[in-house]
């Protein structure tokens, strides 16, 4: 039985230190980044086979997201979000992805709780 809409795998709150930002201080000292990933895919084959090879291993995905956060610095969290979206779409079973990158210690200059960007990308 096929689901009526896209199935999802959601991994929220993937944390790592990155050196992203437009200011020299951000590049020098680094700061925490938090990433949420929502994969859109058909989970029917995995549910029917009970085989992790038919889906995305979310532990391995999380490790790759941490590596993406910790890799080459970029100016914008939009660019980091695109990096993670491209990574998610590299899995052949993934049809689409939503990526939110949070920068909770961004140099905003006023009290705030969170700064985040969300990208929605699809294979097509």
Image (tube, grey):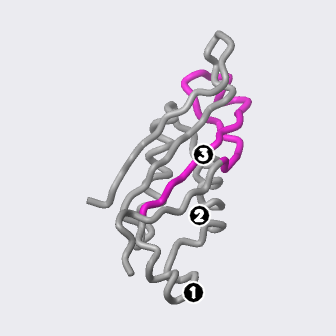
Compared across the picture, whether 4 is left or right of 14 comes to left
Task: Give how far across and how far down residue 116 sits, in percent.
Answer: 54, 32
Residue at the disc numbered 1: 50
Question: Would you say residue 79 sits in the magenta stretch?
Answer: no
Residue 91 vertical position relative to residue 85 in the rendered view, above or below:
below
Question: Would you say residue 34 sits in the magenta stretch?
Answer: yes
Residue in view at x 48 percent, y 62 percent: 8
Please report contact status of discs 3 and 1: CB closer than 8 Å, yes or no: no
Residue at the disc numbered 2: 61
- Which sits earlier in the primary sequence, circle 3 or circle 1? 3
Residue in view at x 51 percent, y 76 percent: 55
Q: Secondary structure at mark 3?
A: strand
Residue 67 vertical position relative to residue 111 in the rendered view, above or below:
below
Q: Which residues are magenta?
A: 13-40
Mark carried by residue 35: 3
Instruction: Report how far apart the C-alphas of labels 2 and 3 lie in the structure.
Output: 12 Å
Instruction: Report how far apart the C-alphas of labels 1 and 2 lie in the structure.
Output: 19 Å
- Which sits earlier in the primary sequence, circle 2 or circle 3? 3
Number of numbered callouts drawn = 3
């Amino acid at each position: 039985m096929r689901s009526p809409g896209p199935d999802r795998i959601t991994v929220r709150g993937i944390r790592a230190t990155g050196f992203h930002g437009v200011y020299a201080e951000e590049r020098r000292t680094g700061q925490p980044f938090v990433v949420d990933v929502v994969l859109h895919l058909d989970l029917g084959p995995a549910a029917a086979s009970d085989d992790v090879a038919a889906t995305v291993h979310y532990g391995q995905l999380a490790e790759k997201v941490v590596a993406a956060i910790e890799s080459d610095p970029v100016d914008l969290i939009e660019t980091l979000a695109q990096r993670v979206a491209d990574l998610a779409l590299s899995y052949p079973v993934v049809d689409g992805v939503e990526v939110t990158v949070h920068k909770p210690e961004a140099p905003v200059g006023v009290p705030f709780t969170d700064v985040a960007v969300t990208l929605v990308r699809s294979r097509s």
